[in-house]
């Protein structure tokens, strides 16, 4: 009994520490260039993490392109819990004839974080300043072509899915009308099933889950791939500030779930499913990497 009480106390202490220090969570953004990845990050963090420079000329616009893998950590607060959110933006691809280089850089980044943990776990004396930088979720931006997945998307997602929780998103979804978007989403999910692309799966009826959780998971699963719209512009309408994209014919509101899935994606990512994403990363994806690596070394 004493042992159990002590373990419980220890758990509480660790939890308190986590809350005080803030939860650490890391999201990687992958997709072709020009799909609105940097804009999305600024929208998600509600701050100019990747400031938009003056891109009046084509030369400047090209300069603005993300050229390297750049992790940035933003301190924020979600539901009263401090969150240390690391965003890993990756260079867009698709405009090169050979995209293998980009892919290998992205994969190497993910595996390097696993290697760091592996080295830390085998040290006799732990480094108190060690920072776990593993990628907990990988948002994969799909071009809103209206057709289906491109070969490149299939290839990238299949290979990255073995190392990270992939959450597919339809980029710039304001470029499709609701019927087109629904049809596109359906085709994307059919491709994902057909090519056996391992994406993050919202937990299925777990015996421990209450009805509400099961319902929520079913709802979120049905939204896949999440449609997103990013914007740093704000307008005030009837005293309400909102982030939106303004067109001559009207407004697309980022946070309106009738316009896109941004707010639902943000909530699952940074709040409701954050812990599940972290657990899968540690218990399954990292464990798999570790096993593969150690058995290779033993050969
Ligand atoms: P990245 O290369 O993927 O990082 O893309 P950027 O964030 O730099 O955005 C490329 C262009 O797309 C910019 O002109 C953005 O203003 C625009 N953009 C970003 N998000 C959206 C969106 O949700 N819808 C539309 N229509 N345009 C967007
Ligand atoms: Mg960018």
Image: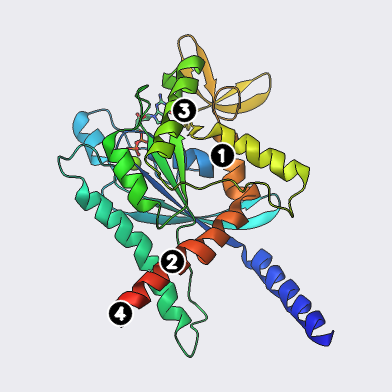
Query: In 3D space, how far apart are the residues under numbered discs 3 and 1 (Cα atoms)?
Result: 15 Å
Is 245 left, or right, of 78 in this rendering? left
Callout 3–callout 1 Cβ contact below 8 Å: no
Residue 282 vertical position relative to residue 225 in the rendered view, above or below: below
Q: Quadrant of residue 215?
A: top right
At label 2, counting other C-alpha atoms closer than 10 Å, the crowd grade (few under 14, some 14-19, many 20 or more) is: some
Estimate the x, y position of residue 80 in percent, counting from the top left: 71, 53
**Label 4 CB less than 8 angstroms from ligand 2:** no
Q: Earlier in the sequence, mark 4 or mark 3?
A: 3
The label number, if any, that marks residue 265 in the structure image: 1
Question: Which quadrant is the C terminus positioned in?
Answer: bottom left
Residue 295 vertical position relative to residue 81 in the rendered view, above or below: below
Q: Earlier in the sequence, mark 4 or mark 1?
A: 1
Estimate the x, y position of residue 272 in percent, counting from the top left: 65, 48
User: Which one is in front in this view, the residue at disc 1 or the one at disc 2?
Assistant: 2
Query: In 3D space, how far apart are the residues under numbered discs 4 and 3 (Cα atoms)?
Result: 42 Å
Which residue is tagged 3?
Answer: 185
Which residue is tagged 4?
Answer: 297
Q: Quadrant of residue 241?
A: top right
Q: Earlier in the sequence, mark 3 or mark 2?
A: 3
Q: In the depicted view, which residue is nearer to us: 189 or 11?
A: 189
Q: Residue at x 41, y 20 (%)?
A: 175
Query: In 3D space, how far apart are the residues under numbered discs 2 and 4 (Cα atoms)?
Result: 14 Å
Q: Secondary structure at mark 1?
A: helix
Q: Earlier in the sequence, mark 3 or mark 1?
A: 3
At label 4, counting other C-alpha atoms closer than 10 Å, the crowd grade (few under 14, some 14-19, many 20 or more) is: few
């Amino acid at each position: 009994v004493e042992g159990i009480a002590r373990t419980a106390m220890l758990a509480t202490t660790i939890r308190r520490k986590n809350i005080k220090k803030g939860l650490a969570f890391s999201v990687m953004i992958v997709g072709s260039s020009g799909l609105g990845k940097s804009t999305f990050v600024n929208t998600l963090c509600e701050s100019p993490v990747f400031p938009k420079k003056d891109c009046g000329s084509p030369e400047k616009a090209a300069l603005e392109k993300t050229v390297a893998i750049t992790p940035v950590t933003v301190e924020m607060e979600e539901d009263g819990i401090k969150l240390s959110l690391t965003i890993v933006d990756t260079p867009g691809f698709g405009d090169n004839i050979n995209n293998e280089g980009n892919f290998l850089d992205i994969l190497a980044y993910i595996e390097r974080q696993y290697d760091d943990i592996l080295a830390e776990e085998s040290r006799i004396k732990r480094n108190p300043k060690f920072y776990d930088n593993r990628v907990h979720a990988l948002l994969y931006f799909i071009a809103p072509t209206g057709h289906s997945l491109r070969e490149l998307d299939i290839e990238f997602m299949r290979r990255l899915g073995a190392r990270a929780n992939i959450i597919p998103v339809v980029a710039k979804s304001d470029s499709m009308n609701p019927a087109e978007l629904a049809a596109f989403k359906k085709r994307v999910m059919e491709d994902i099933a057909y090519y056996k692309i391992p994406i993050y799966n919202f937990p299925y009826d777990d015996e421990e889950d209450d009805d509400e959780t099961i319902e929520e998971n079913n709802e979120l699963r049905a939204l896949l791939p999440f449609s997103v719209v990013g914007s740093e512009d704000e307008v005030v309408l009837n005293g309400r500030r909102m982030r939106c994209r303004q067109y001559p014919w009207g407004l697309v509101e980022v946070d309106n779930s009738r316009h896109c899935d941004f707010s639902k994606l943000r909530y699952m990512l940074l709040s409701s499913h954050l812990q599940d994403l972290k657990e899968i990363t540690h218990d399954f994806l990292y464990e798999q990497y570790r096993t593969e690596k150690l058995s290779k070394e033993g050969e």
